[in-house]
Image: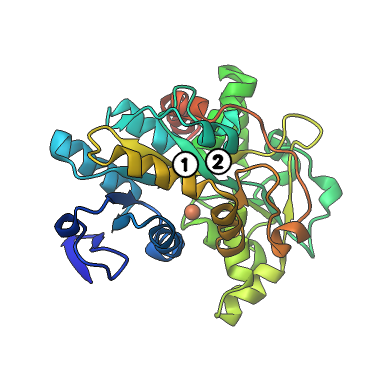
Amino acid sequence: MKIRILPGVQLTLGVCLCLSGALLGAAEVNVYSARKENLIKPLLLRFEEQTDIRVNLITGKADALLQRIVSEGDHSPADVLITTDAGRLYRAQQSQVLQPVDSQILKESVPRQYRDPNGYWYALSLRVRPIMYAADRIRPEELSTYEALGEPLWKQKICVRSSNNIYNQSLVASLLAHLGQEDTLRWTERLVGNFARPPQGGDRDQIRAVAAGQCGLAIANSYYLGKMLTSKDPAQRQAAEKVKVFWPNQEGRGVHVNISGGAVAKYSKNRTSAIKLLEFLASDDAQQWYAETNFEYPVKPGIRPSKMLESWGKFKADSLNLHRLGELNANAVMIMDRARWK
Ligand code: FE
């Protein structure tokens, strides 16, 4: 049963068909998820089966959900927040709507760089933001690093979405962490100078623009390419087949990565169940599901990625602790502004 309660926010009452948990005194957990229902619900159903903990799911846009928890204050029914991008999880922590969790299982499952140093959030899946290039026009030998995308060779050849998108803000924040203020500003200005068109659309639109010849390369999250390659729409599949993945900075720090992650809400009334759910989402089974279904990478070491992900080859990931992306977000936004990245 679904009830619309706010524009863009859906409440799903009990993903299982069990009797009211309150009535039976059964354990339950309220999840606020910025992940779309189809990307989380199958896992929640499995969790319900395994634990007898009833899950109530609310999905919505990431920023709207965070706003909602903040405005609900200590009356918030939220137990677990699931959202994308370390920058957003950091923002949630700064907004004081999360509580720290000290779980041995989570610490063992989630590598240090993918969890908050004080336990306020833990990554659940890994997303990678590589360079994507036109297979018929660009030779991979011409590519090397994000930094090199500022070179004159790429004049009017680069497509990327706008600076108000957190994926790009986090990418620039990672450059700030590695290169410092001056060099990051200079790089951002040069990159913007190489744009083929004013930023528009989402990551899929950048991939489409590469396929259509509007630009030679794009910066986009790799799962979008996976979704396009397996799309029911032949136009999307055809576009995606013209585009290849290049992992930048492999000789150095590694490709920029980000996460989806989960946290326990500050005023959670079902803390034990909330932690159990996060532990479940970090388990082998759940990690495997993420990699197969959404073309994201498992965050837990030792889990094999899907066949498609393997076909794109192995990569070295930047080992920067992702809470730095949050700390540096405001600075990154300022730099993108100064560089006139629309
Ligand atoms: Fe996305």
In the rendered image, residue 307, in percent from the top left (x then y), is placed at 73, 64
Q: Nearer the viewer, residue 220 or 20?
A: 20
Q: Is residue 165 visible?
A: no
| Kind of residue sitting beneath label 1 | Asp
Where is residue 32 drawn, in percent x and y? Answer: 30, 50
Q: Of marks 1 and 2, which one's residue comes earlier in the chain? A: 1
Residue 305 locus on image (x, y percent): 69, 55
Q: Is residue 338 left or right of residue 272?
A: right
- Name the residue: 57% across, 60% down: 289
Which residue does the image show at 59% across and 34% down from the upper left?
108
Q: Secondary structure at mark 2?
A: strand
Residue carrying label 1? 85
**Residues marked 1 and 2 touching at CB (< 8 Å):** yes
Figure check: 249 above or below 286: above
Q: Give me the residue at 59% from left, 78% from top.
A: 235
The residue carrying mark 2 is: 258
Residue 44 appears in which quarter of the rendering? bottom left
**In the drawing, does residue 108 fall left or right of residue 167?**
right
Instruction: Say whether residue 157 is visible.
Output: yes
SS for callout 1: loop
Q: Specify the quadrant that holds the C terminus.
A: top left
The residue nearer to you, when weighing 35 against 152, is 35
The relative height of residue 253 versus residue 271 in the rendered view (above or below) is above
Report the Cα–Cα distance between label 1 and label 2: 6 Å
Q: Quadrant of residue 288?
A: bottom right
| Residue type beneath disc 2 | Asn
> Looking at mark 1, is its residue's CB closer than 8 Å to ligand 1?
no
Tell me where residue 226 appears, x and y as whole percent.
62, 64
Label 1 neighbour load within 10 Å: few <14, some 14-19, many 20+: many
The circle drawn on residue 132 is none
